[in-house]
């Protein structure tokens, strides 16, 4: 079962920042937070991951609260191509060959 | 880097026939591959874990005799849907975890998916 809670949907105006929240109140000390997204009729795409420090890459920023019970994925300047379902997943990378378990995610609609 | 391909991207078949879907890691070796299924407007559901050189591990409720998985090499896993029926129509997605390297924290890379329609 997914260990995260996300809002089912969000809208964002094109060019504005999209802030996608995720609650993971039962996260354990060894678990990382991963974010993936799935554009319609495509496979999931890795976005970013983090343990406890904020992370930034060319796609997005990840802000993790100090208690690690929640996080926010930030797309700084959303475009129409960012319309997708965004999945927040927690996993211990040292847990062997266990797969990523997907919850329902957040459907982000970027509006022109 | 870290590209996973699937073939075919879509397939239409008659009820009762078998369909084979290939999943390849193009630029890395993958000891472990995973197969997911996704119905319309639903999330990805794990079907099975495929380990190179050994039998696949199936999730509860997934018929191993219906969904045959073969992982004969470090870059190829196949899923064969045997005696397909309309209820097997779905989006099948594979993913692979690099045996070495990757992003350093166990990242899975996903294929583009295969849409199966059974008439």
Image (tube, coloured by chain):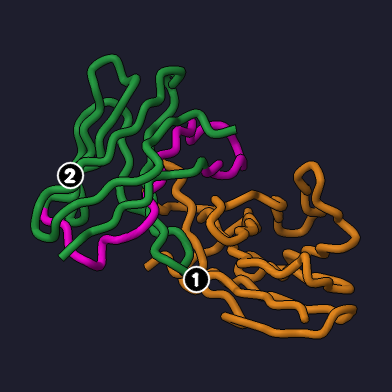
Chain colours: A green, B orange
Residue B104 visible, this angle = no
Residue B56 seen in this snapshot: yes
Q: Nearer the viewer, residue A84 or A53?
A: A84
Residue B55 at x, y = what percent?
82, 54
Is residue B48 one of those drawn in magenta? Answer: no
Numbered label attached to residue B80? none
- Residue at the (33%, 41%) spot, across then down: A49
Q: Crowdedness of circle 1 by 10 Å Cα count: few (<14), some, many (20+)? A: many
Residue position for label 1? B112
Badge 2, how many Cα within 10 Å: few under 14, some, many 20+?
Answer: some
Answer left or right for B20 relative to A75: right
Name the subunit of mark 2: A
Residue A75 vertical placement versus B78 (above, below)? above
Task: Give how far across and how far down residue B74 sits, in percent.
Answer: 63, 65
| Residue that appears at 78% across and 63% down | B69
Secondary element type, mark 1: loop
Between residue B3 and residue A75, name the one nearer to us. Answer: A75
On-image quarter of the C terminus of chain A? bottom left
In the image, is residue A90 part of the stretch drawn in magenta? yes
Q: Which of the 4 image quadrants contains residue A72?
A: top left
- How far apart are the two marked residues, 1 and 2, measured between alpha carbons? 25 Å
Q: Which residues are magenta?
A: A77-102
User: What is the x, y in percent for residue A75?
Assistant: 18, 50
Q: Which residue is mark 2?
A: A56
Q: Nearer the viewer, mark 1 or mark 2?
A: 1
Determine whether the residue tagged by mark 2 lies in a helix, strand or loop: strand
B38 lies above or below B17: above
- Report which quarter residue A68 is drawn in: top left
Residue plotted at (51% across, 67% down): B111
State the residue in front, A43 or A53: A43
Residue located 11% across and 55% down the image: A77
């Amino acid at each position: 079962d997914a260990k995260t809670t996300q809002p089912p949907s969000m809208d964002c105006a094109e060019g504005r920042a999209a802030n996608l929240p995720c609650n993971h109140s039962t996260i354990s000390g060894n678990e990382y937070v991963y974010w993936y997204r799935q554009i319609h009729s495509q496979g999931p795409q890795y976005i970013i991951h983090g343990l406890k420090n904020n992370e930034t890459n060319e796609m997005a920023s990840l802000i993790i609260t100090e208690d690690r019970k929640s996080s926010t994925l930030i797309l700084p300047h959303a475009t129409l191509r960012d319309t997708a379902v965004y999945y927040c997943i927690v996993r211990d990378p040292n847990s062997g060959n266990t797969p990523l378990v997907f919850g329902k995610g957040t459907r982000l609609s970027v509006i022109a | 880097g870290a590209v996973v391909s699937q073939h075919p991207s879509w397939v239409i078949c008659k009820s009762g026939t078998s369909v084979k879907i290939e999943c390849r890691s193009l630029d890395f070796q993958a000891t472990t591959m995973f197969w997911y299924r996704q119905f319309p407007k639903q999330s990805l559901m794990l079907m099975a874990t495929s380990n190179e050189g050994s039998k696949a591990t199936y999730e509860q409720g997934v018929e191993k005799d219906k969904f045959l998985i073969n992982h004969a090499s470090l870059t190829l896993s196949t899923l064969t849907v045997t005696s397909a029926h309309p209820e097997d129509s779905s989006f099948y997605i594979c993913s692979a975890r690099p045996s070495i390297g990757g992003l350093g924290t166990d990242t899975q890379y996903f294929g583009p998916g295969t849409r199966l329609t059974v008439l």
